[in-house]
Image: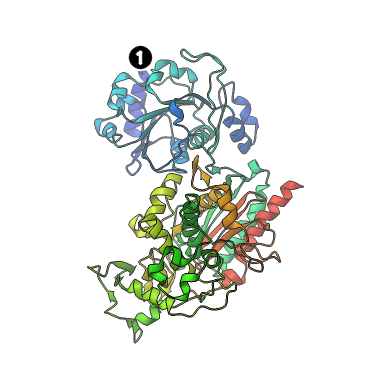
Amino acid sequence: MTFNIKKLGRFTAVLGFILLFSFCVDKKKSRLKFVDAPTTWYSTSLKHLNELKHFEQATEFEKSIVALKNKESILPFMNLNIKISLLSIGGESTFFREGIELFTDVHAIQVPSVNLLNDEQLNSFKSSNYIIIGVHATKQNIILDSINETLLRKLPASTKKILVVFGASDFVNSIDSEYFDAIILGFENHQIAQNRVAQLLFGAIGTNAKTKNKLDKFPTDSGLEIKSNGRLKFSTPEEVGIDPSYFKKIDEIALNGIKMGAYPGCQIAVAIDNKIIFRKSFGTHTYDNKDELVNNDDLYDIASITKIAASTLLAMHLKWKNEFDLNKSLSDYIPEVTKKTAYGSIVIRDMMAHQAGLTPFIPFYKRTLKNGQLDSEIYSTIQKEGYDLKVADGIYIKRTYVDSIYRQILGTPLGTKKYEYSDLCYYFTQKILEKQIGKRQDLFLLENIYKPMGLRYARYLPLNYFEKSQIVPTERDMAFRKQLLHGTVHDPGAAMLGGVAGHAGLFCNATDLASIMQLFLNNGTYGGMQFFDEKTTTEFTKQQFPGNRRGAGFDRPNASGVGTCDNLASAQSFGHSGFTGTLAWADPKDKVIFVFLSNRVHPDQDNWKLKDMGIRTQIQHVVYEAIQARKK
């Protein structure tokens, strides 16, 4: 194995001075913080980009990224239930790291030279499935020391290694290319280059560019095609032909809602043509703490959107595997639950379209109160044997009480078979799904769908995964739990099931929820993986019965064009809303996704200003106006 190892000389001394006096260490990210990456293109082949608008620079640069090597097609990353590390060498790499973090968590280390890597840092890579090595040239085009044999031997042999060069492409002449599973040329250490190469690695964009100059081991016109895998791209309104000034109206409506007390804060995400073009958070977690601003990674209780983002999604996955059938009855799947009651004859298609005669709601918690206080025979203040289902902080319900909940449902007479929205449908759906998969649905979704897709914020029981500070509180519940609900599900019935329910319980941020809605628009594929097919999508999202707008699990527009969504949404569109102040909607006609998350129930669920002011549909209307304007 031959290496051309370049000495750093005076540059090493200068870097040593910088290390002593100019950097700061971010211990959380284990990286050195340098000056910002360049915003000017310097090389002859890319200098013309300086004359273009920012979004045009980005779209044009994408066409120049070259994949010199892609052994066994390891790029783009597909199943993201993996551990990725990033080793950045040379100039500032923040935009590259942040680009990667749009898709997954990454263990990141940045050093000016490989010679400055210590054993502790090298050992931290041992558990990684993939190591991305980014070489970042400075704008002065100082030649970095090569990635030498010592480093290569110290990195785990079993770990896949991806080399990304942000600088002169002839850097690859100084390394043994056989050592790497993939090699990507980013050409300059520009902010846009770092972001777009990161998006290429995860399949949000593709490339088929070729080299223009000969390299030692790669002739002129070298370059492999990497195709997009359907993962959402992070982009701008201009890229999809939309005037960004339209979206100033979104800011105005969202901020006016905060001013009028409709909610303390919110998140909004808009995706068009498989590209997120608007992603923004407004306001604060609560009215009391103005310093706790909502950010894009915060989680909201999405309430009944759980019905499609968790339960219906799982049902579609099982339908694709021939393990779930909308035309079967409850007694076909769970006779031990329905027993010899009339409930056994309920057809699942009827039930998921909310026309099985189920009563809309049962306040289960009221039977567990004595003189307005929790019955001590049903609840415990500590988690202990038999009382292991957490309802809220300091409240644990007796596990066997779950059977009592189902007895109450089965003891309620069925009504006439007509459309009437009911949460109770998904109490039974949960039983069916969990029997089919042999485990709790939250665990199955996490390992088989959410993690592979790269969803880091779609979680039941979020306190098991996140600090409270990242979770937006909901109601100050004085009727049942006598506390501010913060990280435990708002819905009382879902809480009494331990926080994992078919109708409620999922927490999420707007970005991950947009990805789930994109999965539906993609007919079951995302990130190069398939979770169901087009036939399944059609069956579940279509109107199930005349006179009832609902799909199987999904809400749809009324025939009159109004309802949960804006009146400009097409008849093919679908989605769901949530009691806590949420909405997720997808429209195949315009390939548009709209997500709005808020905690309008804070501090009191009787605050209906969000609905009365029509804030969600007003914002969605702006999106459709912008789409219509681009068509003219």
Q: Which residue is mark 1?
A: 3
- Where in the figure is residue 277, as x and y percent of width and height? 59, 47
Rendered residue at 45%/36% (across/down): 77
Rendered residue at 58%/63% (across/down): 555
Q: Residue furthest left?
A: 385
Q: Judge by depth and name the residue closer to the eye, 471 or 428.
A: 428
Rendered residue at 36%/84% (across/down): 372
What colouring does the structure picture have? Answer: rainbow
- Where in the figure is residue 562, as x and y percent of width and height? 67, 66
Q: Is residue 439 above or below residue 75?
A: below
Q: Quadrant of the N terminus?
A: top left
Q: Residue furthest right?
A: 632
Q: Is residue 42 above or below residue 323?
A: above
Is 51 displayed left or right of 398 in the figure? right
Q: Kindly indicate the quadrant of the structure image that contains residue 615.
A: bottom right
**Secondary structure type for disc 1:** loop
Q: Is residue 137 visible?
A: no
Q: Judge by depth and name the residue closer to the eye, 16 or 632.
A: 632
Q: How many circles with numbers are drawn on the protein?
A: 1
- Where in the figure is residue 155, as x and y percent of width and height? 30, 28
